[in-house]
Image: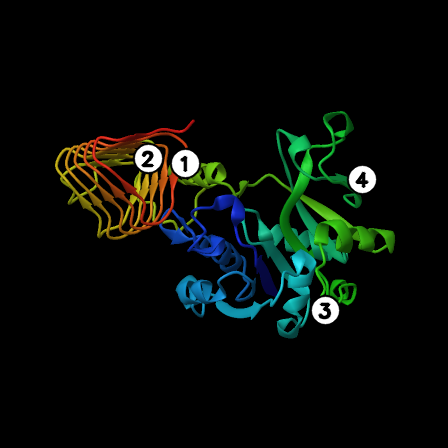
Amino acid sequence: MKAVILAGGEGTRLRPLTLQVPKPVVPIANVPFLGYQLDLLRRHGISEAILSLGYRPDRIEAELGDGSRFGIRLRYVVEQSPLGTGGAFKNAEPFLDGPAVVFNGDILCDFDLTEILRSHRRRAATATLTLTRVDNPAAYGLVETGDDGRVARFLEKPGRDQVTCDTINAGLYVLEPEVLKTISAGVNTSFEREVFPGLLAGGLPVFAYISRGYWIDIGTPQKYLQAHRDILGGRFVSPVSGFRFNPAAPPEQEGCAGLVRNSVVSDSVRVGDEARILGSAIDRDCQVDERAVIEGSVLWKGVQVGKGAQLRGCILGKGCRIGPGAVVGEGVVLGDDARLPADSRLLSP
């Protein structure tokens, strides 16, 4: 079986982080985001994935290559104009020869893919939609299911008085080849609004698998930061993250002059005397000067943090420069190469 990852969007909700870096390869704990999906596929026996791309495909291919780094073979298809989720799946058809696992390219999860595939085959489903439960169903499109697990209907972002369940589309599907026959090539088509409702209307067996595993959509800065906190807090565990400190009682990082706890820090990061890095992810070639404090934050490659600066709960894009004594507060997001003068303060509204 092969997989298709739908990664054609521009990641507008994550701007300014995605102005230069496509969302599929933004770093999550210093690993390109899609690396987690590729690792999940590999661990469940899938050896080939097709990436359906649109925005900056060259940057994505340069980062992920042939997939060997993640133990999986990668192929690439590029849409010339936006095709929607269904159309992007159709665009990968030349590489498909049977049922396929389909991933939305903005979800981080640890679903039991082997069990989802087993459920799909046992029920002889045309399509199996993985669902997850959420605390605030009104913020999402809901998926109602019957007692036998069949999908009954879709409710697109209902009002609070219309909420009938707490299960939402998690963006992971198993689809049989006949699904492709319902999608026209080169036409912008939505799984959620057209393809899946069309399968239901045609009487085809569409089933749900309700997963209790970890799931998050990383599409906003808040969710992106939360994904890091979940990794560093041990709520999401993946062997590709490089997280190497015990969350319960993390030791100091060997070779650092400062204190590093409960964090993912690249080996090339320079940490000055009495600096503190707590619950953060710091990518390659960064410099943290003496007495700086970085807490609950994400720093991309090449960031420089001046002496005595304080960063708490923020995200800094590649190459940012934070002057000595500057303060960056919770929720602040700086794009690539931003500059903050010495002793300045940048706090969220």
Amino acid carrying mark 1 in the image: Arg
Dot 1 corresponds to which residue?
229
Give the spatial CA distance, label 2 vs label 1. 7 Å
Q: Earlier in the sequence, mark 3 or mark 2?
A: 3
- Callout 3 secondary element: loop
Dot 3 corresponds to which residue?
185
From the viewer's perspective, tell me whether residue 215 is left or right of residue 167.
Answer: left
From the viewer's perspective, tell me whether residue 21 is left or right of residue 293.
Answer: right
**Mark count:** 4
Q: Earlier in the sequence, mark 1 or mark 4?
A: 4
Amino acid carrying mark 2 in the image: Gly
Dot 4 corresponds to which residue?
146
Amino acid carrying mark 3 in the image: Ala
x 45%, y 51%: residue: 18
Dot 2 corresponds to which residue?
279
From the viewer's perspective, tell me whether residue 63 is left or right of residue 154.
Answer: left
- Callout 4 secondary element: loop
Q: Earlier in the sequence, mark 1 or mark 3?
A: 3
Q: Nearer the viewer, mark 1 or mark 4?
A: 1
Q: Are marks 2 and 1 in contact (CB under 8 Å)?
A: yes
Amino acid carrying mark 4 in the image: Gly
